[in-house]
Amino acid sequence: MPDRRVRIGPSILSADFLRLGEQIAEAEAAGADFVHVDVMDGRFVPNISVGLPLVEAVRRATKLPVDVHLMIVEPDRWVERFVAAGADLVTVHVEADPHLHRTLRAIEEAGGQPSVALNPATPIAALEEVFPLVRQVLLMSVNPGFGGQTFIPATLDKIRHVLTALDARNPTCLLEVDGGIKAGNLGRIVAAGADTIVAGSAVFAPDRSIAETMAELRAVTDSVR
């Protein structure tokens, strides 16, 4: 039986960028397992976020793994540069890359861990040929592009189906879920089989400390696993 210890990573998309280094340090001290960085290009998703210089800054700010989620077109042009900038794990979208196998291999050859993401409406069958190649599968539980959205309940069944496929074909692969995750729905997400959780506004709350929000999320995961 694979180790399904639940990992929690704050998404800096919801952080205060004026205090980013400080907030990353607070999250690390509060028990975060990794730092999640969303890279958006305004083409694949209807928003623009951060790029290589910020990934380099995050790398300098923490010893935690840096999990970079590329919501961009033509990710194959950029994956090596994001690994060089400090990404430990690089996620590309199956919807954005017609040469997914080659891109995942390029991430690995550059020294990173390859990961693949699915949007809410994309069927699991799109991953059939790459399940053995990846360190992580990321299921989007909102339509990507903006923080603060509401979790899509149908994701729970998708988690279960992907977990079954991974147990059969790549049992050490991480199963990450990202989008709309709060303390109130986290228990169901973990019970369905997710072992890696991305949380943005649930960690970086304006009226609560990061230590408090992380402790709340960890109490939920500990109660389920």
Image (tube, rainbow, N blue to C red):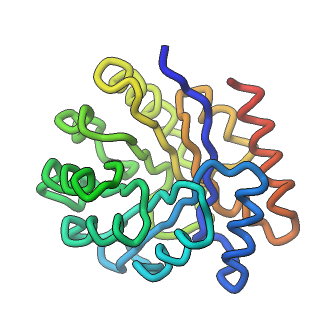
- Which image quadrant for residue 225? top right
In the image, 166 versus 160, the foreground residue is 166
In the image, 198 versus 66, the foreground residue is 66
Relative to 150, does residue 55 appear above or below in the rendering? Answer: below
- Residue at the image point whose x is 44% and y is 62% from the top: 68
Left or right, 79 with respect to 206, comes to left
Residue 50 shows up from this direction = yes
Relative to 158, does residue 55 appear above or below in the rendering? Answer: below
Left or right, 149 with respect to 145, comes to right
- Residue at the image point whose x is 24% and y is 38% from the top: 133
Residue 185 image point, x, y percent = 68, 41
Relative to 127, does residue 79 appear above or below in the rendering? Answer: below
Q: Residue furthest top?
A: 1
- Which image quadrant for residue 162? top left
- Which image quadrant for residue 16? bottom right
Residue 118 shows up from this direction = no
Residue 150 image point, x, y percent = 60, 55
- Residue at the image point whose x is 38% and y is 20% from the top: 167
Residue 169 image point, x, y percent = 28, 23
- Residue at the image point whose x is 86% and y is 54% from the top: 212
- Count how many numbered circles sit on residues in the image: 0
